[in-house]
Amino acid sequence: MKLNLLNGFAKKAVFLITVLSLSALAFGQDRPDALKMLNEGKYAESIRICEMELQENPNNLDSYTVLCWALVANGQYAEAETRATQGRRVGPNDNRLIEVLGEAKYYLGKNDEAMNLFERYVSNVQQNASRLGKVYWLMGEIYIRESKYEHADISLSMAVRIDTNRDDWWTRLGYAREQIGDYSSAIAAYDRALALNSTLSDALNGKVRCQQHL
């Protein structure tokens, strides 16, 4: 009798676990993909999905990463800083969180902290890392903020080597070179920007200024 009862309980337990597992799987399949939402510019939706995922699994580094990317894209820099810091308590060496925390700090004006994180990211990742060009661009922008134009030239040159189609990066490279008096190289950078966007006023004006020095 006791054996029959135990078998009955065991069968019910297995049935319940199976139902719950299938329900969880179905729920997960119905939920939109946070990264897809981010790539489509639906930042608030991406944030909402990631927050749900982190409630279910507070150690999900993928959810922390996409959450922070979406927060930065949505201009929520202080919150991105907080959430990336929380994520790094789970994965202190996760390069994605190191990078996005650097981005958040950059936009908050915390230049030294951002630069330290960017330098760590650059030293850790391979040359085909997806956000490496952006990191070199941001490093260049920090150097421009600090009037370290030779350093900015180096960082921005690396950025446009990785992604040759960013007219704004070429323009900033031209500006950095203009500030150190390398007018011919500045014009070359401005020309690359204008080849990508012929109406770019910053590049047009920069080129005119440089031509006046030659």
Image (cartoon, rainbow, N blue to C red):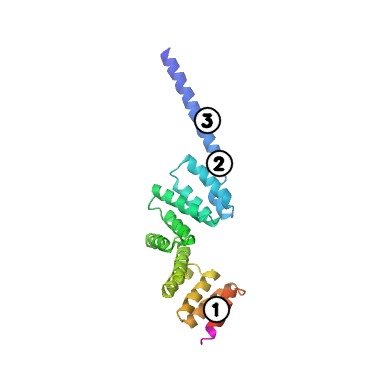
Q: Is residue 52 above or below residue 182?
A: above
Counting residues from the N terminus, which is met first, the one under dot 2 or under dot 3?
3
Tell me the distance, in whole angstroms, between the alpha carbons under discs 1 and 3. 66 Å
What segment carries the magenta color? Answer: 210-214
Viewer-closest of 127 and 94:
94
Q: Which residue sits at x=49%, y=52%?
A: 79
- Viewer can see residue 33: no
Circle 3 SS class: helix
Foreground: disc 1 or disc 2: 1
Overall secondary structure of the magenta section: loop
Q: Which residue is mark 1?
A: 206
Where is residue 194 shown, x and y percent of the image? 58, 75
Q: Which residue sits at x=52%, y=53%?
A: 71
Circle 2 SS class: helix
Q: Which three-letter amino acid code belongs to the residue tagged 3?
A: Val
Where is residue 148 shown, x and y percent of the image? 42, 73
Counting residues from the N terminus, which is met first, the one under dot 1 or under dot 3?
3
Where is residue 64 shown, x and y percent of the image? 47, 49
Q: Which residue sits at x=45%, y=45%?
A: 60
Q: Which residue is mark 2?
A: 29
Left or right side of 120 for 19: right
Farthest residue to the top: give it.
1
Viewer-closest of 47 and 130:
47
Numbered badge on residue 19: 3
Q: Which three-letter amino acid code belongs to the residue tagged 1?
A: Gly
Q: Is residue 133 above or below residue 91?
A: below
